[in-house]
Image (spheres, rainbow, N blue to C red):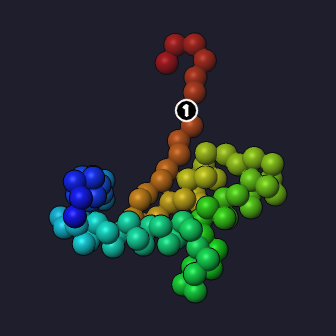
Amino acid sequence: MTDSRERRLDNLQEATGENTKSKALDRAAEFYLRMRGDTTAVPTGAFTELMERAEKQGSVTPEEIAEILDTDDLPVKAEIRWSVGDS
């Protein structure tokens, strides 16, 4: 195993919060499959869904993006907050 691959696996383990490299790889693979799609298990991936919605609507909001990209493996949430004057 190369040093760069070892670092990448360590970083993946840290990012996923998994205790082993094999669990981190499993988690990352599952996320990739859900995002990419084009498989028997996941015919339409989240990225395709996001692009189709943007094309259909002309734009998408952060909330819509979060809704599409949210997974158990990597939760995505959007919150818009603004104020005028003193908060």
* Furthest residue toward top: 85
Query: Residue 26: x percent and y percent?
Result: 33, 73
- Residue with the most extreme left position: 19
Q: Is 31 rendered above or below residue 79?
A: below
Taking 23 as reference, is 4 above or below it?
above
Q: Is residue 13 visible?
A: no
Is residue 45 among the parts visible in the rendering? yes
Quadrant location of the N terminus in the rendered image: bottom left
Q: Kindly identify which residue carries mark 1.
A: 81
- Relative placement, left or right, of 42 versus 13 is right
Residue 3: image quadrant is bottom left
Image spot of residue 63 (x, y percent): 60, 49
Quarter residue 17 falls in:
bottom left
Q: Which residue is at the front of the view, 3 or 9?
A: 3
- In the image, taking residue 67 as reference, residue 54 lies left or right, namely right
Specify few, some or many for label 1: CA neighbours under 10 Å numbering under 14, 14-19, or 20 or more.
Answer: few
Give the camera-side residue of 87 and 46.
46
Judging depth in this view, the residue of 83 and 78 nearest the camera is: 78
Question: Residue, x 42% and y 72% (percent of image)?
Answer: 30
Residue at horizontal 50 percent and vertical 72 percent from the top: 33
Whether residue 47 sits left or right of residue 7 in the image: it is right
> How many labels sit on residues?
1
> Relative to 59, is 83 above or below?
above
Q: Secondary structure at mark 1?
A: loop
Q: Residue at x 38, y 66 (%)?
A: 28
The amino acid on which the numbered mark 1 sits, given as a three-letter code, is: Arg
Q: Position of residue 85 (x, y in %)?
A: 57, 13
Q: Residue reaching furthest front?
A: 2
Which residue is depicted at the point 57% across and 37% down?
Answer: 80
Q: State the image coordinates of residue 69 (x, y, percent, origin top left).
A: 54, 59
